[in-house]
Image: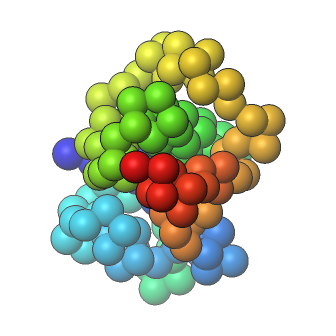
Amino acid sequence: MNTQAQYLKAIYLTQQQADGPASTGDVANLLDVSPASANEMIGKLEDRGLLDHEKYKGVDLTDEGITQARDALQNYCIIERFLIEVLEVEEFRTEARALEGVIDETVAERLDTIIDREPQCPDCFNAEDDVCGLIDIEAEVSSD
């Protein structure tokens, strides 16, 4: 199940890559949901004042939407880094996606004390590779 935070994060990353409004189709693809499901949640997020949606133009996050999206992205980075750096989980991306909807901010903050998040987080996230930019994938894979 995709949560509000996951949608906001997906919209934020899509906007970053598009350098403009996020298309609902791109958001649906990123979250692996139907366009109808994406439209439904986008409508709910718009009702909550977290984004503006203009048909055929796309979705723009409001200031509050951006704040919440960045918080969600930061939590996702923390989860990814904890899984690979501490638990050495090979399929950390899959696990992070499964956990991001169920790990709350308190747990993420506690995990953060273990991984010692960098100050550039969440701007470190590499949307193209769908991974925290602070994770050296090649080094992690070769150390196994």
Front residue of 101/27: it is 101
Q: Position of residue 117 (x, y in %)?
A: 68, 31
Decide if residue 22 is on the left or right side of residue 144: right
Decide if residue 78 is on the left or right side of residue 124: left
Q: In what quadrant of the picture does the N terminus appear?
A: top left
Outermost residue toward the bottom?
56
Front residue of 141/60: it is 141
State the residue at coordinates (32%, 62%).
Answer: 31
Q: Position of residue 142 (x, y in %)?
A: 48, 58
Relative to 137, residue 73 above or below: above
Q: Count all numbered tags in the image, as a single digit.
A: 0
State the residue at coordinates (40%, 49%).
Answer: 144
Outermost residue toward the right?
119
State the residue at coordinates (36%, 26%).
Answer: 103
Decide if residue 33 is on the left or right side of residue 86: left
Front residue of 94/140: it is 140
Relative to 39, residue 80 above or below: above
Q: Position of residue 86 (x, y in %)?
A: 47, 28
Residue 118 visible in the picture: yes
Decide if residue 67 is on the left or right side of residue 25: right
State the residue at coordinates (19%, 71%).
Answer: 34
Relative to 31, residue 81 above or below: above
Q: Quadrant of residue 114?
A: top right
Q: Position of residue 87 (x, y in %)?
A: 39, 30
